[in-house]
Amino acid sequence: MPVNVAQVLGAENIIAVDLRDNLMPSKDLDSALNIVAQLTTYMTNASADEQKGLMKKGDVYLQPDVSFMTAADFDQMTKAYEAGKKVAEDALPQLLRFQLSKADYQAYVKEKQSRRSQLSSATAYYIDEIKIRNNTRLPDRTLRAQLALQTGQVISNESLEQAVKRLQSEDIYGRITYKIDQVDGKNILDMDINEKSWGPGYLNFTLAFEDDFVNRSNFSFGAQYLYTDLTDKGGEWLTEFSLGSWKNVSTEFYFPLDYKQTYFTEFGVSINNEIRKFDRFNFDYINNETNTFHNIETEYKHTNVYAAIGWNFESAAKISLGYNAQKGSINVLSMEQKEDYFLHGPYINMTYDDLDNFFFPSSGLYANAKVGYNQTTSEFHQRGKVDGETYFYDLEVKKPFSFDRHTIAFTAKVAGSDSEEMLPIYAQALGGMFNLSGYHRYELNGRYSAFASMIYRYRLLDNNFGAFKLPVYAGGSIEQGGVWDKSSNVSWSSSISAGSVYVAVDSILGPVYLSYGLAEGGQSAFYLSLGGRW
């Protein structure tokens, strides 16, 4: 019940409708879900009480009796309508003072339509001056640089909207409004820019679970903290961690070098611990004899440090040149053997991303290419230290096509390295939901990988609640790919076919998936995930 927001927007009188849920009796607090629901209800009601206290004399407070339902009981809407009608009728003595005569109301509608037609008829404006009401932690010149609007020239409505979108794409701003004022014969662009009220730090979570209901389950839980406005040019600090079957901790800094954020530097460090399985590998680690082993389970541990300088040459495209160093070990668990290694070298990374939604895209394009070179030193059992050179590459393209409520998203990716270690340092993995569904994450590993998929999505429900949307989707996927130890083995005939069916919700907490995957050879798994890749 955002009374404070209405006051900030300039409301002289407020009619507030309080749709609070009732607290559950203590006897119903018998599960974790009910306890969380009770806590949420209490916090919501406490917020409504606080907002009610902000109301002034002359404001009207309405609280319909909706104790028979919760926010999710859509089948009770008829009764809710009747409850709202009753509380409004009971408050008529307070509400009638806002009533207009029929003539006054028609005059109001005419004036509003006249203003709207004047605004819509103008497609461009000559802007003499730009005025910014800056309610952020960033200086005005940073905002002006990001807007990239020039005075003393004609600016189209489309250019104004694109400028606002450039700011909103930073994902740190809340409400951004603008208007054109005429003062002393000049056109003044008056912009009101507000950052998100819960910033400058943002906390996100992810949860994933997968099970084949036979002999294997995997789970992961992660958190991400992003701190923005670290510098006056818009620097950021990002920290992430994941726990569960795969463990990861990373932190990185992003520093724009100019106020328009055209150029930037970035630095980061990460620590990883991953369990990977290799189906077939040849080892010649004893007396130069070659031995073939199957289902080799390994534990990868490594620490990676990198630094890069980059160029945002378009709002959706960037290129960076960096240098990374990595130290780690690969433990072959079943053989009690260990490979230690150290590598360092340059890389170049190019990204284009104008997808309208990363998890449920309907338009746009995502493309990423990373190639690099490393000098490597590794030591495995009795072989002693081995020095080598490694080239690696990682390419991915994602393109959705939509028609009405139907979307088909195509994905293709290839990756590999020409390393000569016993086990690849740059291990390429497949497995997991929409990544050879039916297999578990990191279940298929090799030196090279290739993968393609087609994911179909149908929007079942829009669930547009005005302030937020909660669309529900259903669909399926067709997937083909594989991993290989040698580039000469890469072929379509040795790749694996897979597919999945799923239902999903694009929630305010991130994407929620319930999926079943089946792969060639009878591999299958159920997936439940909340949130997703960062």
Image: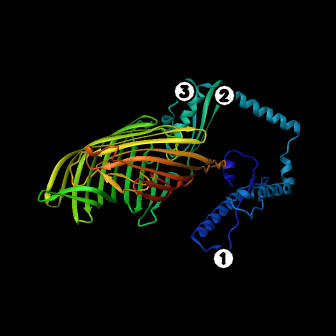
Q: Nearer the viewer, residue 426 or 296?
A: 296
Question: Label 3 near label 1: C-beta < 8 Å?
Answer: no
Secondary structure beneath dot 2 equals strand
Amino acid type, mark 3: Thr
Drawn side of residue 207 relative to residue 470, left or right: left
Alpha carbon separation for disc pair 1 and 2:
64 Å
Q: Residue at x 61, y 30 (%)?
A: 188
Q: Residues within 10 Å of mark 3 (few under 14, many from 20)?
A: some
Q: Which residue is mark 1?
A: 27
Amino acid type, mark 1: Lys
Closer to the chain start, of discs 1 and 3, is 1
Is residue 474 among the parts visible in the rendering? yes
Amino acid type, mark 2: Gln
Alpha carbon separation for disc pair 1 and 3:
66 Å
Q: Which residue is mark 2?
A: 182
Secondary structure beneath dot 3 equals loop
Secondary structure beneath dot 1 equals helix
Q: Nearer the viewer, residue 87 or 302?
A: 302
Q: Quadrant of the N terminus?
A: bottom right
Drawn side of residue 528 relative to residue 273, left or right: right
Where does the image place residue 298, in percent across and percent down from the top left? Answer: 29, 61
How many badges with numbers are in the image?
A: 3
